[in-house]
Amino acid sequence: MKSFVYPQDLGCLKKAMQEALEIKHDRYKYQHLGKNKTLMMIFFNNSLRTRLSTQKAAMNLGMNVIVLDVNAGAWKLETERGVIMDGDKAEHLLEAIPVMASYCDVIGVRSFAGLTDRDYDYAETVLNQFLKYSGKPVFAMETATVHPLQSFADLITMEESWAKENNLPFLNGNYQNFDFNHKKMKVVLTWAPHCRALPQAVPNSFAQWMLAAPDVELVVTHPEGYELDPAFLQYTDPVSGEVKNAVVEYNQKKALEGADFVYAKNWSCPGVTNPELYGQILSKDMSWTIDSEHMSWTNNGKFLHCLPVRRGLIVTDDVIESENSLVIPEAANREISCSVVLKRILESL
Amino acid sequence: MKSFVYPQDLGCLKKAMQEALEIKHDRYKYQHLGKNKTLMMIFFNNSLRTRLSTQKAAMNLGMNVIVLDVNAGAWKLETERGVIMDGDKAEHLLEAIPVMASYCDVIGVRSFAGLTDRDYDYAETVLNQFLKYSGKPVFAMETATVHPLQSFADLITMEESWAKENNLPFLNGNYQNFDFNHKKMKVVLTWAPHCRALPQAVPNSFAQWMLAAPDVELVVTHPEGYELDPAFLQYTDPVSGEVKNAVVEYNQKKALEGADFVYAKNWSCPGVTNPELYGQILSKDMSWTIDSEHMSWTNNGKFLHCLPVRRGLIVTDDVIESENSLVIPEAANREISCSVVLKRILESL
Amino acid sequence: MKSFVYPQDLGCLKKAMQEALEIKHDRYKYQHLGKNKTLMMIFFNNSLRTRLSTQKAAMNLGMNVIVLDVNAGAWKLETERGVIMDGDKAEHLLEAIPVMASYCDVIGVRSFAGLTDRDYDYAETVLNQFLKYSGKPVFAMETATVHPLQSFADLITMEESWAKENNLPFLNGNYQNFDFNHKKMKVVLTWAPHCRALPQAVPNSFAQWMLAAPDVELVVTHPEGYELDPAFLQYTDPVSGEVKNAVVEYNQKKALEGADFVYAKNWSCPGVTNPELYGQILSKDMSWTIDSEHMSWTNNGKFLHCLPVRRGLIVTDDVIESENSLVIPEAANREISCSVVLKRILESL
């Protein structure tokens, strides 16, 4: 696997899920793969879970890890071409990328959306420069438009929860028996209010991965104007060619009815209908905050969120602390999703 | 050992000292214990010695190490419950703790006293949340009220120095012969002036550990108003039930007379007699600075300080650079005290 | 090898080059040397290449690595003696150095010139305190006046390029055949304009290493006033006693004529003729920027720069992106030069 940005990069999702469950059963099984291989994690933005879980996954696989915070202890990087660099940016990404790549075997990149220039963000300008100029396998640790390690962990978490609730046979170490052949799960991705403008990377990827999972029925709900980019609301299976679409439902209550899983997340305006509103906060409507009443509309639904989460805005204390909250095992599965990705990359070196 | 905060956590102190001397003799002896075990070091505050010595100790034991500076490259963490998180803190400690814990086997926490709310600090609010919610062994890398890795290293340093001066038989690799059965050492903990308000963690722990050591006679000296919390001035031996008290002597010269070891340290007002003065600077009396005249009152006493130390305020150049200064071997022993703690924790996993 | 600051520290440069090519051929060959050895990298200033390549080299050699950013997460350090430390610097280098040294086996130090006090900078005050007080091998990761890891990598890069162009027999793994017995290479070190005042460490070291290489004819060109310190423009071979001098040519065009290699770099006034101008910008003359016209004067010359480079000031886009640009392999060779240095140090422990 030469890069990891979209679910398609994993090929057969069933096989990827089996590997995830296998690695969760024995995290050190593939430790020989990483000997004398170096992962470089490059952060243009802050991180807690991604930093820690990726580092842990790489160490599980026997890799050496170098962490680079571009804004702390390194030089600021110019990302535009053809400029006279007489400002505060001491180095151009066009040099920095091949240089950094020369000291490692695999690259992880975190580079958030700036939320001011939709074209720049949705062209994945920074990520694509890494893909083009590094000459090394690159995986996304949340980029301008996607966060696939999160969504893969989300999927693992829902499948595990569902299997536990329904006593499915692939649990208890029988990971090779995992398949998607069970009752469809109703998954609702719901917008929730927040005090700051946030990127669309998590909801974009989440929608995409849920559509890629054969056992998921996806409903997306949000106030008017928050429509996600259509590219993420339709998915064509790379093997079967089957096309799957998300259902968009503006009435949050109607959307949540009968939900097996509620995935709450804030995002700023994706600028689909009006590009000038891109990255803006259109609503802080607190009636969208997930509280116990919202959860009562569901089918005893489980609550998920990628974290970090603002309590009192996205979700109430009682919901996130309830037995139906999966946020902690969800975060813990970041180590697993990343382990699968790194294992695949190491196997391809 | 499930946590390390107080001397009692080590059980028999003689045995812990023997282990310390054993590990100092062969730092890599227990390297097998740490294989595929990950230490997560979480810093809410700055660190030099603790960061480096803990990392070194963990690597000696074969562990993987992840260092997290909460205020650099991660999210700011909310520590209070029941708030609407619309400020600058993006994540709640109640999520962050179990998440961080899910990526490691052992947690070290540094979280200093805020010095504004005595109850909050002395309740060890942050440390206790880690103890309660992480589900992993936790050790203190200096918390609001204690710094046990430092005090354990202080004890090792004094025992080594005393043994060298008195040709005691446990030196030269005969660590199994170590015991406390020798002439009592007079140890004086003396307050000294400083330009900023400092926590009480070091003097608290130091007093506690000196009382826990059967061969130490402890005198504490400081200006009026700097009385340490009584909980740290009395120690009940967990095995024998014996109770030992520190002597408090307000006359610094009288306290230092005949001292074998002088431990200088500044601390701000502990607020024992007047809680409203908690964390304040009550005195900058430079007559308390340890200079060669002060040292002349002692029994050719050795000088110790946990570092970092402000020269010219706490101690003069000539004293800290003298042959009787133990500050460098004292700091070096941080690697040893931490090695014992991590070894014990690894053995209990 | 007890320290690495100057080319003389490597002894026979031919042998060092052979080791470099050997290690490049098999980076993990000497991995056994670093077992249970710890490198401490201490940064008083920012770093990208040095941080990453040094870490990589150390891991290749099986070492443990601790990275310390003095200005991020640690205490600010006082470097002057005899002061009352009541300012923002919490710790004195005289304590910090032996303490840091006690937790490691090898120390790398980065400490840039302050450019305000020529005597302080050119006395290598900080580096020399590490050499004097650490008791451990110390190597320069760019100090006030030198950057030897860079210059050694520059030399490796030029030799490789020259061998490739001329089909010299030591390529293709025959590293043991490397020698300097080939046609002399004309190397030009040229000043170029920059928006900020930069240290002289890179040009100083570059001149020194080029003079140390028997196959290099060195010409240095810069505007009036930018004369490098004479100590770096003359080199006495430690074995043969032969003295070699750089040619200084103020006419850039004349200097570049027939050049095989063009090494562009900005530096601020070295203050040789007028110490009061030390560290100042005397010229921003853009006619010195290396563009394709400048390169046309050379003997199909290769372009080098230590990076980070300001495009549009030092060099134009087309030159740095041309086939004759060696900046990326040059940076990649930082891993190699550092590997040789660390191998030598480890062998001497």
Image: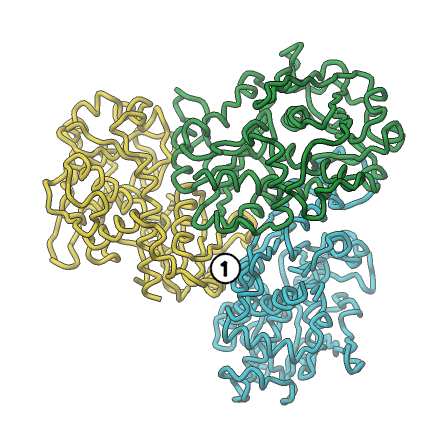
Chain colours: A cyan, B yellow, C green
What x and y, as percent, mark residue B190?
23, 33
Query: Disc 1 is attached to a residue of which chain?
Result: B
Quarter-of-image position of residue B302: top left
User: Residue A250, image x and y in percent?
Assistant: 73, 74
Q: For this view, does B234 lie left or right of residue A289? A: left
State the residue at coordinates (63%, 51%). A43
The type of residue carrying mark 1 is His
Residue A49 in view here: no
**Residue C139 % position (x, y):** 52, 34
Give the vertical position of B41 relative to A29 (above or below): above
Asked if residue B122 can be seen in this view, the reply is yes
Residue identifier under label 1:
B92
In the image, residue A77 above or below residue C200? below
Label 1 crowd (10 A; few <14 / some 14-19 / many >=20)? many
Residue at position x 25%, y 53% in the image:
B19
Residue C256, quarter of picture: top right
For this view, does C241 lie left or right of residue B44? Answer: right
